[in-house]
Amino acid sequence: MAKRRLPEVNSGSMADIAFQLLIFFIITTTMDTDAGLFRKLPPMPENNEIEQQEVKDRNVFVVLVNKENQLLVENELVDIRDLRIRAKEFIENPNNDDNLPERIVTEIDYFGAIPITKFHVISLQNDRGTSYKTYLAVQNELTAAYNELRNELAMRKFKMAYDDFKGEEGEEDPRKTAIDEVYPLRISEAEPRNIGGN
Amino acid sequence: MAKFRKKGKGALPAVSTASLPDIVFLLLIFFIVSSTMRETDLKVRYQTPFGTEIKKLEKKSLVSYIHIGRPADQKLGTAPRIQLNDAFATPDKIREFIASERQNMSEADRNKMSVSLKADGEIDMGIITDVKQELRKASALKVNYSTRKGTQKLIFENLR
């Protein structure tokens, strides 16, 4: 038996090989953390029946966006910078104004009987010619209005930021649910219409 | 003085590079794990608008993507187009697409399905509205409008 020792494989180039692989992965990787604005679409009405709901005028906040990307809020031309504050005032109705949504005393966990504007509706309507970025900016501002109100409430009541409520394993934090009940997200998008041309 | 000089003359030991492969491998593994290979070839160009009130999409397996933008191939003109999977499509194909995406999901996950709309900020709402109507018909009601994280200032500047 020939006693021959196998020469050890040189592992010096291991680092180079690994580097090459590494560079390949760095280049091909797309770290897209996908994020965006969540919305729930209303279900399609069956048999073309559009349910007519009686909504009091004071409970509706109409936002129209035309093809020039201008905003008409409650029949007034409004700059998008003012939309958030207007929406917040509408949702909250802090001074119990007669023109803003009615506040109805409701029993909610953690808060007890509390007056909330539970029938308010933000009605959003856009033209086919509205640009998508304007539409999303409007949606974003409206969402921001809700989030700010919820956050303010969370701070007042629980001394915690609204975003910090972490539920356990798929369940929502009950305090968060209660806050959502005080300020329910009620944005309604009108059935599309083609007005003002394209 | 002499003492110091003596010390300076001694050759520095070379830093051992033996652990270099280990370090590189560690990095490599990190990138392999965190990478998501792009599954579809993008045929449309889009740049999503900015948003501040955004939430992260969880569970990628439950998300279907619809891309809307101008064709990447300039020969195809500039009219906004919809891309489903790997091909251009018309809005009426969306129902089929949603149905096939549902088929690929487990029974329990089907009602958790959401659709991510990756659309260009510059396009008009017309095509988006059509897509939304089709999604409603297909009862895929959870929609995520894909946005980039930005500040309020950035959003308003981008509007001009």
Image: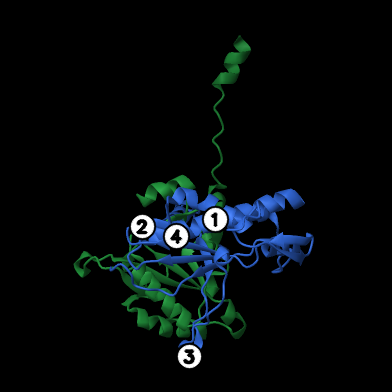
Q: Which mark is residue A47?
A: 3
Q: Position of residue B114 (x, y in %)?
A: 52, 73
- What is the three-letter code of the residue carrying label 2? Asn
Residue tagged 2: A69
Supply the letter of whichever chain is blue.
Answer: A
Gap between marks 2 and 3, in whole Å? 33 Å
Location of the C terminus of chain A by quadrant is bottom left
Q: Which mark is residue A87?
A: 1
Dot 2 alpha-carbon crowd within 10 angstroms: few under 14, some 14 to 19, many 20 or more: many
Seen from the viewer's position, the closer of residues A29 and A69 is A69
Q: Are marks 3 and 1 in contact (CB under 8 Å)?
A: no
Gap between marks 1 and 2, in whole Å? 18 Å
Residue tagged 4: A136
Q: Position of residue A108 (x, y in %)?
A: 76, 65
Which residue is located at x 56 percent, y 41 percent? B16
Gap between marks 4 and 3, in whole Å? 31 Å
Chain assignment, label 1: A
Of the image marks 4 and 3, the number of the one nearer the N terminus: 3
Among the 4 quarters of the image, the one containing residue A182: bottom right
Dot 4 alpha-carbon crowd within 10 angstroms: few under 14, some 14 to 19, many 20 or more: many
Of the image marks 2 and 3, the number of the one nearer the N terminus: 3
Location of the N terminus of chain A by quadrant is bottom right
Left or right of A38 in this view: A68:
left
